[in-house]
Image (spheres, rainbow, N blue to C red):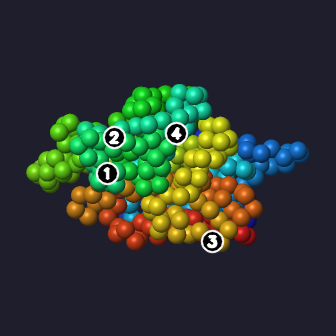
Amino acid sequence: MPFEFLFRRIGIVAGLSSLAACVPAGRETLSPAALPITVQTTTPAHTPPRLPARRPQPSADLLNAVQALGAGFDGAVGISVRDIDEGWVVAWEGDTPRPQQSVSKLWVAIAVMDAVDRGQMSLADPVTVTQSDLTVFHQPIRALVGKDGYRTTIGALLSGAMTRSDNTCNDVLLWRVGGPAAINRMLATKGVAGVTFGPGERHLQARTAGLEWRPEWAGGWGFLQARAAMTYEARDKALRRYLAAPIDGASSNGVTLGLSLLAQGKLLSPRSTTSLLTLMRSSKTGPLRLKSGLRPGWTLAHKTGTGQELGTLSTGYNDVGLLVAPDGHRYAVAVMIASTRQPIPARMRLMGDLTRAVVAAADR
């Protein structure tokens, strides 16, 4: 099928317009016009001396791959691939808000580095983490926090949040930069559209479960006990309410826009951009998600997110990042699984397959 004809069949959206539809409940074949896949073409990040007559376009192979991955996955998923250097975007349900979970740590990290750039704080600034600062779920720093607290630095907390996805490290940094309202102002000011920051780890997880956070739950055990005492029906109702309108919602296109702006140096100073991307390349989480599709010479600076589960239902299973080819060509990629009953290997395979599709298209 000719390339131009293929694009006419699925619909090209120029600029910032998009085509949206819902994921079908079954796996029946849809007509091309009904498929929730979009293509956007924008001004390239690096404008060549002589502008070509036609803007760069994604390959038909990548377009078909993204469509197949989105349509073939049994769950609510958003996928976005943004070519930072050429300016195009291919997405599957790319404008639908989905739970970020720990992907939101990326925006806290940007706010911290922005404060460093403006001289409001230093990575060497001392911080004492107390037991009342402890949050829920994954928080490796908890073992270090005694009755007198744990003395550390802003830089060490940032490393813990970004490389180990430590919830307590992230929440301490969040309040150091002004809390959720400050993060949302930063996102709006810097033009990261399609991303909303939630209320912070403790309040987010409590509300997702249908509870209100209590200070005495610091550390997590009290929260887990309270959640365990709830009925299945109450938790199911709360979780479905969260999925319908996630308080930490972001679209996959919004996330790749933020990653693109970061990579282009439009959010932070060159030094802070390099420092943050170095941390993201050093991430210990999600080695079998997007990273599993890498090939020799390719690198990934990424941030994962993992939400709560209820029975066989998994929520907020994500991986987003900056994928760089051996020749330096850059892609912002995001896979955000809002909900699914697929097992972990199937979720990870979806993410790895997206990376493999981008690599294969670039190598052709």
How far apart are labels 1 and 3 at the CA level? Answer: 37 Å
Disc 4 residue crowd, few under 14, some 14–19, many 20+, Cα 10 Å: some
Name the residue: 52% across, 63% down.
Answer: 290
Which label belongs to residue 184?
none
User: What residue is pinned by disc 3?
Assistant: 295
Residue at image mark 2: 129
Residue linked to disc 1: 144
Q: Quadrant of the C terminus?
A: bottom right
Going from the N terminus, do you reach mark 4 or mark 2 first? Answer: 4
- Give the mark nearer the N terminus: 3 vs 2: 2
Q: Quadrant of the N terminus?
A: bottom right
Q: Position of residue 109 (x, y in %)?
A: 50, 42
- Image vertical order of residue 209 relative to residue 349, above or below: above
Looking at the rendered structure, the kind of residue marked 3 is Arg
Question: Residue sitting at 51 percent across and 49 percent down?
Answer: 252
Task: For marks 4 and 3, give the CA distance.
Answer: 33 Å
Q: Residues within 10 Å of mark 3 (few under 14, many from 20)?
A: some
270 with respect to 46 (left or right): left
Q: Are marks 1 and 4 in contact (CB under 8 Å)?
A: no
Q: CA distance from mark 4 to mark 2?
A: 15 Å
Asked if residue 275 lies left or right of residue 199, the reply is right
- Disc 1 is placed on an element classified as helix
Whether label 1 touches label 2, CB < 8 Å:
yes
Give, as a three-letter code, the residue at label 1. Answer: Leu
The type of residue carrying mark 4 is Leu
Image quarter of residue 271: top right
The location of residue 208, given as percent across then percent down, is 27, 45
> Label 3's element?
loop
- Write down the residue under mark 4: 123
Mark 2 surroundings within 10 Å by alpha-carbon count, few (fewer than 14), some (14 through 19), many (20 or more):
many
Q: Earlier in the sequence, mark 1 or mark 2?
A: 2
